[in-house]
Image (tube, rainbow, N blue to C red):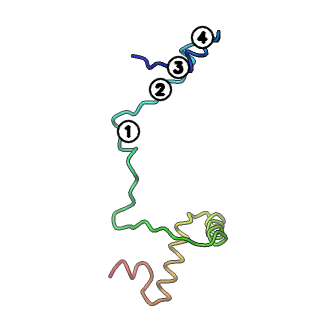
Amino acid sequence: MKKRNAALEALQGAGFEVAEETLPPAPTVASENVHALRPVRGPKGVAKVMVYMPGKVARKFREIAFTEERKANDVYLEALDLFLTKQGHGGIKGVVER
């Protein structure tokens, strides 16, 4: 059973011819793709954290990541590792292994 398309009917009523085969097919979701619609979760044991920082600092992190062909997340983790090491916690590895 086809759905009624009021816009298409209005065009046809105004003297326009619209061939049904030129219309794009309606999107469908296959049952095997249902899992793709669920939110993505990170690896087990990894927390998602949001950080607010000045815009210029965020741009600088992205610039560093771009010039080094890395992801910005990797640059953030490197900075966090250096901070934890400076504070005497042994970096990220030292905290995780405790």
Judge by depth and name the residue closer to the eye, 18 or 65. Answer: 18
Q: Nearer the viewer, mark 2 or mark 4?
A: 4
Q: Are marks 2 and 4 in contact (CB under 8 Å)?
A: no
Residue 32 lies in quadrant: top left
User: Which residue position is annotated with label 2?
Assistant: 26
User: Which residue position is annotated with label 4?
Assistant: 13
Q: Position of residue 83 (x, y in %)?
A: 51, 83
Q: Along the polypeptide, which appears first: circle 2 or circle 4?
A: 4
Helix, strand or loop at mark 1: helix
- Which quadrant of the rendered structure holds the N terminus? top left
- Three-letter amino acid code at disc 2? Ala
Q: Position of residue 90 (x, y in %)?
A: 43, 85
Q: Along the polypeptide, which appears first: circle 1 or circle 2?
A: 2
Q: Along the polypeptide, which appears first: circle 4 or circle 3?
A: 3
- Three-letter amino acid code at disc 1? Asn
Q: How many residues crowd mark 3 within 10 Å: few (<14), some (14–19), many (20+)?
A: few
- Which quadrant of the rendered structure holds the C terminus? bottom left
- Three-letter amino acid code at disc 4? Gly
Q: Nearer the viewer, mark 3 or mark 1?
A: 3
User: Which residue position is annotated with label 1?
Assistant: 33
Helix, strand or loop at mark 2: loop
Helix, strand or loop at mark 3: helix
Q: How many residues crowd mark 2 within 10 Å: few (<14), some (14–19), many (20+)?
A: few
